[in-house]
Image (cartoon, grey):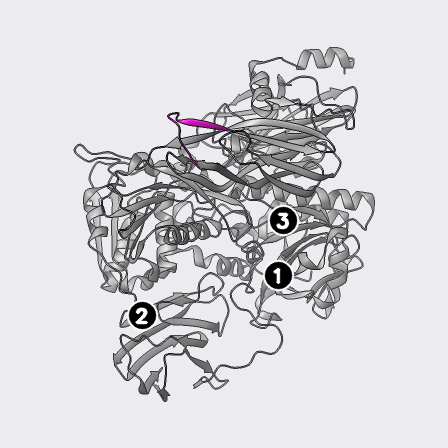
Amino acid sequence: MQNQKRKEKAMQRRTSFALAVALLLFSSTQLQANDYLPSVDDTLTIKNWLAVGPFSTGTREGYIDHLTDQGGEEVIQPYEGLQHPSIMAQGGTVSWKKVESKDGMLKLSYENVNWEALQAHHGWAGTGGTGYAYTQIEMNGPRRALIMTEKVGSFWLNGWHYYGDVYGIRRGKVRVLVPVLLQKGTNRILLKFGVGRKRKSLIFKIIPQKEALAFNLLDVTVPDAIAGKALKAWMAIPLINTTGQTLKGVVLKVGSGEIFEETETILPSMAPLTIEKVPVRLETKGEVLTDKDTLFVAIVAEVAGKRISARIPVRVRQPGQAFRTTYRSSADSSVQEFTVVPPKPFRPDNTYGLILALHGASVPSGWVEGCYTPKSWAFVVGPTNRRPYGFDWQDWGRIDALEVLNQMIKRYRIEPDRIYLTGHSMGGHGTWHVGLHHADLFAAIAPSAGWTSFNLYVPFFMRRTYIYAPPKLRSIRNMALREDRAEVFLKNALNLPVYILQGGDDDEVPPVHARIMFQGLKQLGYDVTYQEIPGKKHWWDQEGVDGTACVNYPALIEFLRNRVRNPVPRKVVFKTTDLGLNNRMYWVQIDQLVRLYRDATVVAEVKSTHQLDLETSNIAQFTIFPPKDLIELGILHFKVNNQRLSTRLRNYSPITFSRTRRGRFVLRRPRHKGLWKRPGLYGPIKDAYFSPFIFVYGTTGTPEETRVNLHIARNKAQKWWYRGNGWVRVIPDTSITRSIIENYNLILFGGPGSNLITRRIATQLPISIHGHRVKFGDKKLPQKHLAVKVVYPNPLNREKLVLVNAGTDLQGMKLVEVLDTLHASAGLPDYVIYGKGIKTQGWGGMVAAGFFDGNWKLDPSLGIVILQ
């Protein structure tokens, strides 16, 4: 290596980009960095790199380590010409080659791959790959910095893993800024990114940050102001602790001057090198009276007597225009936005319908403003799915859609029987997913270019899991993913009219998806209309159609307008696999299954005012809410699976049926002793993130264990912010209070040897770590260096969940980060135990996985343990 001054001079560039970042982050500041490590002096754009790839990667298996033949991603120090096996490349190997970046941008191509042959044989699934780029920089002392990436899924810095910006949504602008500490001497940097047929471009820059705190102003969630009305709403500001220290008593102030009230939010602490998108109130002092289209609100962050400040633009809309508004999510108390296209004309005393419009991948909620014309009879509303890519309208995306629906009902006079669901592409899939699982909420649904499920859209057959995992392991994963397969739940549309719109030449979501769903609904004899437009591709317009034709298609809109929901249909068909997702359809509720995560169906029909027939499959307990419009008081007769029962109906209270051991039903609600699975306490692992949660890292082990626990916790917090526009606090185990235990699900990082809370509850969990072994029920697993993830009712508060992320040792703890549930179709059950084989064989490296039974006990039929 050359001496440090010459090396840094060669690698550092002063760019206009750096100036832009500085201006965006801070309009004024008095906060000094003297109490913390110094920052890098200038923006670093590294010119010289080594690059290698591509390596075949199955859908959603970005955690696979393709470099294990040379030590793996964590430790590799490649050189030019170093080879690795790759099934994508001609000749079966790829080698590291020198490449140069320009102003931080790397452009890569892979001529050693026959892309046409791969796609011809495997389709899209065969062209998904992973690439790497490696470099080193020298520092003459430890430094603080912010890392900016684009189209880089993750990166390694000196053996520590960080998440980047996998999507690169806002090209040329900072969206993800990751705080890091650079060490004195050599710093090793390894980038990991997805590649495909197109030429790959990515960006990596090291940004200076003089102050301890930073705003990321390009990811602020802020509502619009409406002229003539007062603004009282939530906004959220990403705040970054750029230091290696915990910052105590951070104060965030919003508003000052003539227009905005000053509001104040206090963060008790911010963990080192963390990002928190903090909810704050935005309130005007009265009605917004201005002829400007933008106002500016001042924000200030203070800690230890020092401050940073900036101004945030607030768009001003005129009455009748589309506008952006916000709400706080019940899942994590984060601030989410949605866009409203009000009726034209709008009269506050009138009632209106509601069209909930779900966007496609990479599209923001504001898409509805330009794509839909105002309707005289309905609001058009665009939720966000948490982010432009978000969760494919599954999981937290589904929750976001339902929360926005409820927000509109609270704020406006919405007719409950004239609520409609539509969406395009990914939003079309969301229309199927949300609409079929919650069919009783909508008068009709209308997917446009909607794909059915991942397994049909981008098949899983190239996943290492499907190549190496034994059949029962794959079946457990499939059980967890079953709820995401929209085509499985078509039966639920008995009372839900469906309009399907599809471009005949769509090469992004091929018409086969729409045709499958149309065929299935037709075979069931349901109310379905299919319109395939010849010659049209994925996104299309049509002469004479206002807005965007593929979503604002007149026949589609008219179909919705002419449908009115029947809230109490005479016949109900309800099929589900996961009672934690939804357990009620119209007047029928499923309380318990016989076999968890298997298909369960109830068909209920009112035959007369005193007769109700039911057919059930895989149901241990269900409840009927007698509809007053269909049932009269008096003797009510039931026929349940050819079994006859009767009861006197004195009022319209719910009636519960419980299945005996002999398979017959009785009219009673059993008393549950001890733990039992129910909505909110059902599992699987992702259920811990569906209601308020907090990250708790262990501090009672060795310094290295504490460092690993903290690093994984803040990495997952960053991922939650990036993927889900979310907010979560990261706190040490020593800061847990009774109030936190009572109000939050606890996401624990560290085993009983390094986390106080894990230690307190370990003996009350069916899966835990004892010494350096995993105790699974009454036996200890023989394998070493294992990672454990298990969700369970918190022994300290049985009304909340605890999710333990632990390792049998330091090596096992580092593996905890490999698998997580913070993306769509993760497919994790109630518990997983795995070793380093997960990095090369996917679920083929799993030691144990499965679900607990209805009483939260281990059940061999719901899991698998591999002892060798």
The N terminus lies in quadrant:
top right
- Which structural element holds mark 2? strand
Q: Which residues are magenta?
A: 287-296
**Magenta stretch holds residue 707:** no
Q: Residue furthest right?
A: 702
Please indicate, yes or no, whether residue 100 appears anywhere in the rendered image.
no
- State which quadrant residue 371 falls in: top left
Closer to the camera, 58 or 95?
A: 58
Q: Kindly identify which residue carries mark 1.
A: 801
The amino acid type of the residue labelled 3 equals Ile
Closer to the camera, 537 or 495?
A: 495
In percent of width and height, residue 125 lies at 44, 42
- State which quadrant residue 206 falls in: top right
The amino acid type of the residue labelled 2 equals Val
In percent of width and height, residue 328 lies at 50, 48
User: Residue at point 30% right, 46% down?
Assistant: 379
Which callout, 3 or 1, points at the residue further toward the start of the chain? 1
User: Residue at point 55% right, 60% down?
Assistant: 684
In percent of width and height, residue 366 lies at 38, 36
Closer to the camera, 219 or 554?
A: 219
Q: Kindly identify which residue carries mark 3.
A: 838
